[in-house]
Image (cartoon, rainbow, N blue to C red):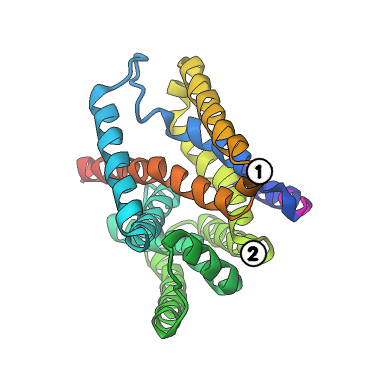
Amino acid sequence: MTELVLVTLLAAGLFALPPSAHALILALGIATGMPHGATDLITEDGRISRPALAYYGVGILLLGLLWWWAPGWALGVFLVLSMLHFGSEDAASDSGTALFIHESVVRGLIVVLAPSIFYESEVLRLFGLLADESWAGPTWDHLRSATQTAWIALAFTLFGHYAVRATAWRHVAFVFIQMLVLVGIFRVLPPLTAFVAYFVGGHSLHSARKIWPVLRAHWGKVLGATLFTFAVASLVFLNGGEAAWGDRLVRTAFISLSLFAVPHGIWRTAEVLRGRWSKA
């Protein structure tokens, strides 16, 4: 319930901001994102995990090369892994395997599909900016239409899937209220702003509950990593002059964040799946 209230309040606050507040919105996302993923590298006793550091180093290098060599494929990888990561983190962890997968797909698709439906021209412009080529055309239209139809079918059958599992109706209602609120936020707010509202108030807060003991015990290292990220970002954008606050800001920030987000998404999704397999 806390996540639902916070997401709604954040969405209302971001809705009141002017379009020129992109830098503030991105800063809010970074400030939440760094603590959200810092525990991938920090062990429970406070040490930096060398295997995790090596994994991130290799992952960032490979993804960076993919963005340079084939940005369209890099964007596709980012979208698919985002769907898997957000869906698997937000789905009810105590559900049976089939129900968990079903709910994960429905939840994950909202974050990717809803902006494409409600703000198609803006999303296509963003994708074109990131991929260095236009995504508009018959292929995009067919893919979006097929995905939208599949999501409606999956969302409708998810209700029945919960019913046959004899889950408490209060929980079923809460799950669908969460998804309806999220769809509403992506309908009202521009894509990047809506995503920050969901990421800060929903996804990151939900994840923070799981990693809170490590965050609390080693807050100094997490804060240091966050401040370092802000310092690097400030140098990049301030040295770029006024031009850096337009398309260049969006593209640079998006790709830079994806370099951390994709390895983190793979890491966390693998942890979720390992946890489920160990209980099976």
Q: Which mark is residue 184?
A: 2
- Report the mark closest to the observer, 1 or 2: 1
Q: Position of residue 101 (x, y in %)?
A: 33, 59
Amino acid type, callout 2: Gly
Q: Where does the image place residue 50, in percent across and percent down from the top left?
A: 25, 22
* Relative vertical location of residue 262 with respect to residue 104 in this rendering, above or below: above
| Left-right relation of 180 to 85 | right
Q: Residues within 10 Å of mark 2 (few under 14, many from 20)?
A: some
Do the numbered discs 1 and 2 sit on residues whose CB atoms are within 8 Å?
Answer: no
Residue 17 part of the magenta segment: yes
Q: Is residue 142 magenta?
A: no
Which label was assigned to residue 144?
none
Residue position for label 1: 23
Residue numbers of the magenta segment: 14-18
Q: Residues within 10 Å of mark 1 (few under 14, many from 20)?
A: some
Q: Residue at x 56, y 31 (%)?
A: 235
* Label 2 element class: helix
